[in-house]
Amino acid sequence: MTRKERYEGIVGWFSLNRPVAETELHYDSPFHLLLAVILSAQCTDRRVNMVTPALFERFPDPASMAEASAEEIFPYIKSISYPSSKAAHLRDASRMIVEDFGGDVPSDRESLKKLPGVGQKTANVMMSVVHGAPVIAVDTHVFRVAHRLGLSSGKTPLDVEKDLEKNIPVDRRAISHHWLILHGRYVCTARSPRCDECEIRQWCKDWERRQKNTEKEAR
Ligand code: SF4
C-alpha cells in the first residue's frame, strides 16, 4: 500500500466515523486553554483538569496572574509534573501577554512561541483549537501513531508535522491532531496497542508488517 493510500483511507475513515473530535482539556477562554496546555506537558489531561477549576477561578485573566508570584501559583498546580518551573512559566507568560500583547493571547505562531513555556506544539494547539488554523500539533501520541501507521518516518516532531501537513487536506488538518491524539491515547497506546480493536488497521503499516511476518512463519 502506498503512503498516499494510507492517508486517504485513514483521513476518510476518521472523517466519516469521527466527524467531531476535540481537546479533552477543560477551558473557558484562550488564556485558560494556554495555561492548561502548558500544564499538560509531560502530564495527563485528566490530572490537569483536576487542578484547573481552582486555578482558573483564582486567576481569571492574564492581568490577575501577571500580578502574582510563582509562589502564589505553585499551590494550585503542585500535583502536576514540574510544578516549580511551570508556575514560573505561567507567571512569565501572563506578564508578557499583558506587557507586550495588550492583554490578549496572541494568535500567530511566532508571537506565541515568544511566551515562556510555549514551543511549536503548544503554539500549534492554540492556533488550531482557538482559531481553527490548518496546523497539526505533534505530541508524543501523534508522533508514535504517525510512525506506526506509516504516515511519517520523520525523526523529529517537526519532520512529522511537515509530513502530516503536506498530506492531510487543509480542511482536515485541525481536527486530525485530535483524531491521532485520541487514537494514541485509547487504542494505539504506547505499551500495548489494541490492534484487535483498531478500526483503521487495514491502513496501518505496522499491522501490515506483522501480518506479513505471521504469514511467512506459517509457510
Ligand atoms: S493496528 Fe495497532 S499499531 Fe496499527 S494503528 Fe491500530 S492499534 Fe496502532
Image: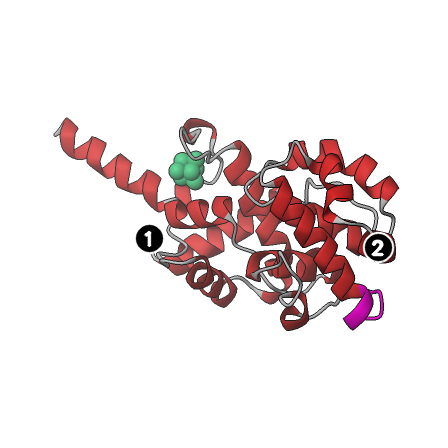
Disc 2 residue type (three-letter): Glu
Residues in magenta, as a range: 98-104
- Residue at the outermost left position: 219
Name the residue at 53% across, 52% down. 11
Residue 67: which numbered mark, if any? 2
Identify which residue is drawn at 84% across, 55% down: 67
Image coords of residue 7 (percent x, y): 46, 56
Residue 158 on image: x %, y %: 46, 62
Task: First in sequence, mark 1 or 2: give its number.
Answer: 1
What kind of residue is marked 1?
Met
Percent x, y for residue 42?
A: 54, 41
In the rendered view of the protein, which quadrant contains the C terminus? Answer: top left
Mark sitting on residue 1: 1
Asked if the residue under mark 2 is in contact with the one under mark 1, i.e. CB atoms within 8 Å, the reply is no
SS class, disc 1: loop
Task: Indicate the quadrant of ligand 1 in the picture.
Answer: top left
The residue under the point 68% across, 45% down is 23
Is residue 47 or residue 203 the one in the foreground? 47
Residue drawn at (43%, 45%) of the image = 144
Between 185 and 15, the residue placed more toward the observer is 185
**Residue sitting nearer the eye, 43 or 211:** 43
Q: Is there any visible trace of residue 201 in the rendered image?
A: no
Whether 105 is among the magenta residues is no
The vertical placement of 67 against 25, above or below, is below
